[in-house]
Image: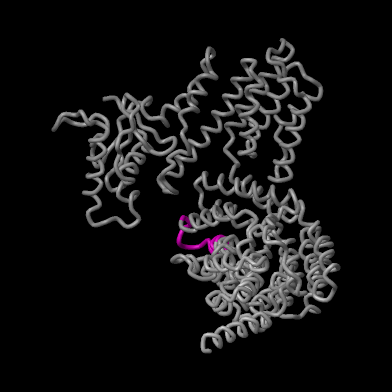
């Protein structure tokens, strides 16, 4: 039976009819993958044991032999008993896979990409090679040390194949056909200058000169502004040629262009021979993403996108120390506790955890600290206040404490500022911790001012705006808001004004008539459009309107309002109760999860408390009372954006309602 093996995607094998063979468990597939990586060379049994297990079982050698036997039965089911295997052979101290090149998709792909171009069908050959990819190489395995280099090599070959396919389309006169794939290619891999060059050339040859020049401007912006490098000589030369419509850009240039083409091809060969500077560029890119993130609007969104791409690219290179630097250099101060992109945050936390495990056990304390602080900052507002899954609540807080301990031990001011940001993000495991956050803000302000860290000095002031609001000290909050605005003006930090303007709207809402308070919030909301802060924007203005209604004793908006964003579950019971839909309100309270651990926690619990009182739901009242008691001395204004007034007032209403209910039952 003829068998083919695939690793360009999940590890699999098929018979000659294309039916998948049963390779049994993940360890069986891991053995097969490890032998594919070895490329027909013998892998000693001891090496297989070390690669398969961090802590090998006592019978590891015998278990490996069992796996090999199972693989042989799957790959050669027709082999007669007691005849030697042909495919997975025993040789010396171990095993080797003796498959033909065309029978393993990765080997076949590499041969197709590396072979001299077939002038009769280069595009077809490369298309067939790229079609072999079913997903990321070895997709069902994680960050195994024995796999990193091979996965990175195959990924690089795939990118090269995409560019060579585009070259083949250009050479055959099918320039327009190359454009869509190249556009996707440079979007996903913005560091590949050859991709940019080919896209611009394909557009030019498709009669789209203006679009070609626009692409080159995009390339310059991405490489220069975002990645810290200037476009290379080939990109600069292409732009000059397009502007003067040089003859050598035509698909079939005349004799005058021959020398230029020879020079360009020689330059390309030289550039491919130069060792890759991908690691240096990735570090530079991540550092510039940090600067871009504080510019606001599109800059923040672009920084998030390119940061994720840089981290993924660093992991593909298989260098744990580089990946740690790429992740950790993005130490952008964060004051808002709901993530703008929760899915990306989860991916970053996972990448940081993987990189921590891969770092050598000795040394690298600064990198370890930055990874731990990243975990703490990116895990903000994602865990429930009660009934967490096993281990969920402990890790981010543990990471924050470890990062702070390392930074203090190293006596590194920028590192400590970043670690304190992570500590701040993990001070929401219960209500009533405004004083703790105020102390963190005060230390951050002092540390940053002493060491010339203006962004962290702003962070410290904004933390203190929030904490002083929660502690009822609006005069103190005013001083910190003014200090934050002054620093923002000096250091071009436009996003700071979003927070301070919203704080001043809260300030207005405390004393002004409802109409004036609502107008202040409407003006503040205008700053959210285009800010790039989805976690702050969604549902905030409706919540602010509701807070004004609650504090002035006005009825809440109609319960059919759909603009509440992430706050909707904790607003809905009060809206239902206000609309006379008591049974629905009680059902909503019964199924209500705890609010996220963030700056809105006290305010949302106060809304739950009001709904529970309104429908006389004793269980919900007791639950809200238990959560709010630690904050009895605070205002429900810890966000610095909206206020539900003193927490003590809500607790008094809960106590009175519970006592009334108890009296009725006694009577």
Q: Is there any visible trace of residue 107 in the rendered image?
A: yes
- In this view, 293 is above or below 570: above
Residue in the foreground of this view, choosing between 503 and 540: 540
Residue 272 forms part of the magenta stretch? no
In the image, residue 258 lies at what x, y percent?
69, 14
Question: Which scheme is used to colour this image of the protein?
Answer: one colour
* Residue 139 pos. (x, y %): 44, 41
Please tell me which residue is depicted at 44% across the width and 35% down the height of the picture: 8
Is 42 rendered above or below residue 435? above
- Is 361 included in the stretch rendered in magenta? yes
Occupied quadrant, residue 503 = bottom right
Horizontal placement of 430 versus 56: left or right? right
Q: Residue at x 61, y 71 (%)?
A: 608
Residue 306, image x, y percentages: 64, 46
- Total marks placed: 0
Confirm whether residue 450 shows in the render: no
Q: Which of the 4 image quarters holds residue 462?
A: bottom right
Position of 105 with respect to 419 (left or right) is: left
Residue 127 to residue 656: above or below: above
- Furthest residue in direction front, as rendered: 667
Residues drawn in magenta: 358-371
Q: Position of residue 628 (x, y in %)?
A: 60, 78
457 relative to 648, above or below:
above
Task: Please identify the quadrant where the N terminus is shown.
Answer: top left
Residue lying farthest to the top in this orientation: 255
The residue positioned 55% from the left and 85% from the top of the image is 664
């Amino acid at each position: 039976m003829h068998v083919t093996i695939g690793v360009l995607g999940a590890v699999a094998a098929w018979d000659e009819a294309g039916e998948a063979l049963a390779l049994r468990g993940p360890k069986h597939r891991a053995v097969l993958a490890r032998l594919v990586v070895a490329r027909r060379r013998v892998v000693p049994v001891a090496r297989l044991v070390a690669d398969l297990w961090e802590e090998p079982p006592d019978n590891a050698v015998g278990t490996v032999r069992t796996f090999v036997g199972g693989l042989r039965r799957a790959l050669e089911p027709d082999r007669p008993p007691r005849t030697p295997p042909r495919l997975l052979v025993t040789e010396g101290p171990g095993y080797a896979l003796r498959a033909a090149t065309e029978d393993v998709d990765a080997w076949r792909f590499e041969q197709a990409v590396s072979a001299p171009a077939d002038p009769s069908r280069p595009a077809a050959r490369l298309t067939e090679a790229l079609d072999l990819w079913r997903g990321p190489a070895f997709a069902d395995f994680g960050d195994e040390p024995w796999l990193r280099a091979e996965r990175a090599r195959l990924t690089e070959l795939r990118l090269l194949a995409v560019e060579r396919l585009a070259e083949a389309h250009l050479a055959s006169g099918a320039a327009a056909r190359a454009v869509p794939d190249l556009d996707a290619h440079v979007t996903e891999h913005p560091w590949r200058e050859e991709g940019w060059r080919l896209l611009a050339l394909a557009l030019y040859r498709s009669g789209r000169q203006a679009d070609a020049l626009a692409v080159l401007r995009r390339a310059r912006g991405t490489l220069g502004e975002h990645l810290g490098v200037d476009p290379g000589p080939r990109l600069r030369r292409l732009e000059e040629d397009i502007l003067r419509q040089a003859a050598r850009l035509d698909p079939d240039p005349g004799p005058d262009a021959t020398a230029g083409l020879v020079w360009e091809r020689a330059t390309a060969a030289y550039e491919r021979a130069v060792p890759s500077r991908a690691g240096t560029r990735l570090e530079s890119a991540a550092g510039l993403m940090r600067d871009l993130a504080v510019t606001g609007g599109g800059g923040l969104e672009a920084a998030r996108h390119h940061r994720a791409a840089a981290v993924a690219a660093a992991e593909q290179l298989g260098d744990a120390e580089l990946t740690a630097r790429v992740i950790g250099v993005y130490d952008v101060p964060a004051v808002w506790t709901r993530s703008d992109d929760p899915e990306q945050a989860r991916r970053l936390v996972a990448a940081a955890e993987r990189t921590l495990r891969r770092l050598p056990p000795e040394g690298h304390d600064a990198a370890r600290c930055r990874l731990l602080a990243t975990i703490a900052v990116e895990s903000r507002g994602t865990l429930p206040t009660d009934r967490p899954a096993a281990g969920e609540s402990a890790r981010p807080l543990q990471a924050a404490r470890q990062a702070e301990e390392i930074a203090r031990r190293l006596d590194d001011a920028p590192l400590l500022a970043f670690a304190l940001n992570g500590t701040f993000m993990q001070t929401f495991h219960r209500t009533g911790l405004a004083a703790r956050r105020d102390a963190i803000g005060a230390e951050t302000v002092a540390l940053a001012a002493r060491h010339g860290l203006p962004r962290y000095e702003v962070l410290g002031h904004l933390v203190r705006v929030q904490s002083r609001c929660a502690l009822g000290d609006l005069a103190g909050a005013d001083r910190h808001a003014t200090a934050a605005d002054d620093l923002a003006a000096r250091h071009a930090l436009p996003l700071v004004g979003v927070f301070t303007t919203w704080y001043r709207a809260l300030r207005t809402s405390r004393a002004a008539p409802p109409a004036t308070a609502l107008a202040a919030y409407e003006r503040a909301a205008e700053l959210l459009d285009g800010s790039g802060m989805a976690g702050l924007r969604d549902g905030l203005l409706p919540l602010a309107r509701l807070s004004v209604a609650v504090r002035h004793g006005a009825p809440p908006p109609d319960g059919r309002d759909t603009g509440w964003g992430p706050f909707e579950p904790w607003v809905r019971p009060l809206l239902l109760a206000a609309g006379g839909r008591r049974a629905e309100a009680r059902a909503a309270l019964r199924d209500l999860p705890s609010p996220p651990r963030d700056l809105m926690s006290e305010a949302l619990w106060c809304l739950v408390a009001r709904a529970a009182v309104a429908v006389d739901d004793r269980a919900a009242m007791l639950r809200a009372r238990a959560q709010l008691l630690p904050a009895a001395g605070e205002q429900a204004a810890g966000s610095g954006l909206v206020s539900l007034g003193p927490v003590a007032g809500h607790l008094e209403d809960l106590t009175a309602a519970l006592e009334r209910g108890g009296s009725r039952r006694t009577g």
